[in-house]
Amino acid sequence: MERLDRIGQRNLIFGTDADNNIRSVNVDEEGNIGVSPDSIEDIVDPLDSISRSLGCGRIFNATLTMADDNATVFTLEETLIKYAKIVVTGHNMLFGDSVSQLFEVEADGELELPKFDLSRLWFRNAGAGQNGTVTIIGVEE
C-alpha cells in the first residue's frame, strides 16, 4: 500500500493494493490499527470531516473516463488544490494546460501535485481512441 497522506493524530492512510483495490489504515489514539477495503466514498467522507476539523480545505474527489480524444478538464471554475494524487488507469494520458498536453503518465501510473489550480490542469488520451481514466483525490486550499 502506498502512503497518500497522514491527517492529524488519527493517522488515516489510504492508497491502493497490488490489485488496485482501495485500502485504508486507521491508527487510533490508543495505537489500535484497522485495515479495510473501502470504496472511495467510504474514505473521502471521513477524510473530509477530519480535514475540516483540522482547519484544512475540503476533500476533492473525481473520476473521469475519456469518451473521445479531445482535451478536457475536471472543472472550469478556479479550484485551488493544496495537494493531490492523480491516478491513471486503462491507457496512458497526457497532461498540460488548455493549449498543450505533453506530460505523459502511463496507465496504472500516478502523479502527485502540490499547490495548483485544478481548472488549469487539462488532460487527454495519449493514443487515439485509447480512452483512459483519470482519478484525482486531493485537499482544497
Image (cartoon, rainbow, N blue to C red):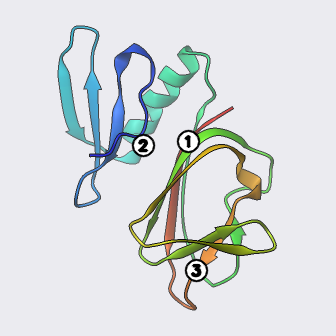
Q: Residues within 10 Å of mark 2 (few under 14, many from 20)?
A: few
What label sits on residue 138 in the rendered view?
Answer: 1
Q: Position of residue 83 (x, y in %)?
A: 58, 39
SS at circle 3: strand
SS at circle 1: strand
Choose top left, top right, bottom left or bottom right for residue 71: bottom right
Q: Residues within 10 Å of mark 1 (few under 14, many from 20)?
A: many
Which one is closest to the eye, mark 2 or mark 3?
3
Which numbered disc, 2 or 3, marks the residue that appears first in the sequence?
2
Task: Please name the residue shown 35% across and 23% down the image.
Answer: 11
Relative to 93, residue 130 above or below: below
Task: Please name the residue shown 43% across and 28% down the image.
Answer: 46
Choose top left, top right, bottom left or bottom right for residue 66: bottom right
* Amino acid type for the residue under numbered disc 2: Glu
Question: Label 2 vs label 3: CA separation?
Answer: 26 Å
Q: Is residue 139 left or right of residue 17?
A: right
What label sits on residue 41 in the rendered view?
Answer: 2
Task: Please name the residue shown 24% across and 52% down the image.
Answer: 17
Question: Label 1 vs label 3: CA separation?
Answer: 22 Å
SS at circle 2: helix
What label sits on residue 125 in the rendered view?
Answer: 3
Q: Is residue 91 left or right of residue 96?
A: left
Q: Is residue 78 left or right of residue 86?
A: right
